[in-house]
Image (cartoon, rainbow, N blue to C red):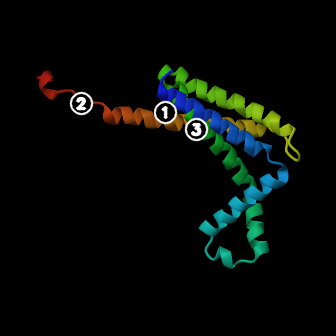
Amino acid sequence: MSKRRLIFMILSLIWMVVIFCFSSRDADESEKDSYKVGLTVGKIVIPDFEEKSEVEQLEFAQKIDHPVRKAAHATEYAILGMLLVGVFYPMGKLGLLLPFILSALYAVTDEIHQVFVPGRDGNATDVMIDSSGALIGVLILFIIISLKKKITKKPQDISSEL
């Protein structure tokens, strides 16, 4: 195994541990994290957000809580898919399919794990969101790699064609 692939394998495993740790947080801790993100979003996108009352700020965070959580799911797995591409990429098309499949399987195990976490549950919809995130991550990286190959491709010597 090449050094590059080994590094991506280690990074993938570390990221899987990070996902596991986020999933291990009980419902209250997870909700607090989501609200913090919601409050940060409010500060960024709403003028004078900090002048609003604490109740209004919290209402905003609660209002966007669901999309924040689902975006976090998709992003976690997009990153995992990209890291796994680094492990399997030299394998051609299989190197793009395997990262998606492994990410989707990990999403299933993650949702099963959440069944055993207080206040959390396993959710098939989250598996679909996670898998979609992984697919998007793999596709984004595939597009970047393809563009890089096109850009770095050496133009043929025009004199050889004459």
| Three-letter residue code for mark 2 | Pro
Residue sitting at the far front: 3
Q: Position of residue 159 (x, y in %)?
A: 12, 26
Residue occupied by mark 3: 136
| Disc 1 element | helix
Q: Position of residue 87 (x, y in %)?
A: 54, 27
Q: Residues within 10 Å of mark 1 (few under 14, many from 20)?
A: some
Is residue 132 something that shows in the picture? no
Q: Quadrant of the C terminus?
A: top left
Q: Is residue 36 rendered to the left or right of residue 26?
A: left
Residues at marks 2 and 3, CA–CA distance in whole angstroms: 31 Å
Q: Position of residue 143 (x, y in %)?
A: 46, 36
Residue positioned 63% across, 45% down in the render: 75
Residue occupied by mark 1: 142
Of labels 2 and 3, earlier in sequence is: 3
Residues at marks 3 and 1, CA–CA distance in whole angstroms: 10 Å
Residue occupied by mark 2: 155
Of labels 2 and 1, earlier in sequence is: 1
Q: Is residue 48 rendered to the left or right of residue 21?
A: left
Vertical arrangement, residue 126 with respect to residue 26, above or below: above
Residue positioned 74% across, 43% down in the render: 21
| Disc 3 element | helix
Residue sitting at the far bottom: 51
Of labels 3 and 1, earlier in sequence is: 3
